[in-house]
Structures are given as structure tokens and as C-alpha cells.
Image: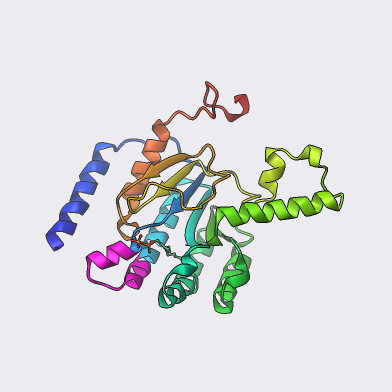
Amino acid sequence: MFEKFFFRKNEKRREAGRVSGGLHKIPTHVAIIMDGNGRWAQERGLPRIAGHREAMKTVKKVTRETSRLGVKVLTLYAFSTENWRRPKKEVEYLMKLPQQFLRSYLVELIENNIQVRVMGDMSRIPDYTMRAIHQAVSRTKQNDGMILNFALNYGSHSEIAEAFRTMIHDVRSGKLDEEQVDEKIVSGYLLSKSLPDPDLLIRTGGEIRLSNFMLWQLAYTELWFTDTFWPDFDEDDLHEAIRDFGKRQRRYGGLKENRSEK
Ligand code: FPP
């Protein structure tokens, strides 16, 4: 079993080496669907929550490296509106992760000028989780380095439905003229309103789907999928994704790599 993991890791490093070179184009906003924690644990005969525990280490690694590379926003899909369907014990463990993570890492986030944010429906989040999040958000709100944005109890469909509700309310109350509703106005009603759309989406764990994640915002995002489970994802994998992003020509439906000319 060990041999298998050792081989896989070395193989990954060799592959990363092959594409090595300059990281000349750094995406402004990287969004990540962190998948494969459960399978990582199962492969080792461990309970699924051991995979989530290990996942936190990867979150730290990737936060450090994206910030070091000059990424401006890192959005991590930490808990979806569908994840409540998991066994109670697993949900409870997942809800404890922000607290655990921030307890061991908030000081480093502050030192590195990182600003913590959260995006999702906070109404179902337990009090102890909310307290940790509020503390992290308020202690980092003056920071003007990378934004570390956790999507927590987040689902794109419910985000869009809520945007519709608010928009209809604003039209009815005269706050918004329906003739003015365009793409920019719609974006302004979403939870990501103050953030640029992601330039690069990474999904680990081998599935090739978006799982109700930032569906509006990902319209022109470059997608990058890997079989690597999130707990095994490392700096080499991140570099590989960013290098691949650097090779893509983004045309936004037009002919040149310039969104304003679309
Ligand atoms: C998907 O893997 C992962 C999740 C549902 C949870 C993601 C959470 C983390 C990576 C930790 C977040 C850390 C902080 C600091 C909030 P899965 O369980 O669906 O894996 P599987 O597809 O192999 O079953």
C-alpha cells in the first residue's frame, strides 16, 4: 500500500517537473472545489473525518502559496447546501473545522495580511462556528492582502433564487428600475458582489462537474480538473494548474484576450 502512495507522489512530482517553467500569468481569483477527502481516508482504512482533518493542512498550504504568488482572491468550497445530507457525525465534524482551522492559523493569516471572508447562508451554521468566523473576519478586515473567501453552506441555485427575491422586492418598492437590470446589476445581487469572477477553477478528486458552485460567476472561468485527492494536493499541483491557466487564451466569446472587447 505504501509503495502505491510513494509511487503516485513521485510520479506527480515528475509530471510537475515536466511542465516546470515560469509562472508568468497569475490568476487574480482562484476558486477551488476541494474534493476527495473521504476517498483519501477510505484508501487508508481511516474514517472519513480523518480525510477532512488532513484537508485542513492542504488548505493552509494552498493559502500560503496562493498568497505568496500574488493571487488576490482564493475562494474555497468548504460546505455546500447539499452537504447537510451527510451523516450527522460528519456534518458536525465539518462544522467544527472552521473553528479548528482558525484557532491554529488565524495569527499566521493576520501576519500575512490576509483578509478572511465567508459567503453562504449563515442561518443554519452553529453558534460556535459563527463565533470563530466573526472573530476571524473582524480581526482581518483591515488587511489588504489576499482575500481568503470560504464558501460555507453555499449553493449557487439558492444564491440566485435569493438574488431574484431581493431584486423583485427592490423593483416593487421602487428602489430598482427593471429596465436597468443588466449583467452588472445581477452580479451585484449575488453573495460574491464585491469580488471579481474567478479566473481559474480547480477541482480535485477526479469528478468533472461544478456541483452547484458559483454557476453565474464561472461563465468565463478556465476550468482545471485533477484526479488527486484534496489531502494530497500540494504546491506542485497548484503550480501545474496555474501554468496551464497561463497557456490558455481567454477570448470571452470574442477574438482577442480582452474582456472589454467582447
Ligand atoms: C469533499 O470531499 C469535501 C468536503 C465536503 C469538505 C471540504 C472541507 C475541507 C476541505 C476542509 C475545510 C477546511 C476549513 C478550514 C473550513 P468528500 O468528503 O466529498 O470526499 P469524497 O468525494 O472522497 O467522499
How far across and how far down the image is residue 184, in percent? 69, 40
Rendered-image quarter of ligand 1? bottom left
Q: Residue at x 41, y 37 (%)?
A: 245
Q: Quadrant of the C terminus?
A: top right
Q: Quadrant of residue 161?
A: bottom right
Q: Residue at x 53, y 59 (%)?
A: 151
- Asked if residue 50 is among those painted magenta in the image, a careful observer would answer yes
Q: Is residue 150 visible?
A: yes
Over which residues does the magenta segment extend? 38-54
Relative to residue 44, is residue 90 drawn left or right? right
Q: Is residue 23 visible?
A: no
How far across and how far down the image is residue 25, in percent? 45, 36
- Asked if residue 114 is among those painted magenta in the image, a careful observer would answer no
Considering only vertical position in the picture, is 120 above or below 32?
below
Colouring: rainbow
Q: Quadrant of residue 36?
A: bottom left
Is most of the magenta stretch helix, strand or loop? helix
Q: Quadrant of the N terminus?
A: bottom left
Q: Residue furthest right?
A: 174
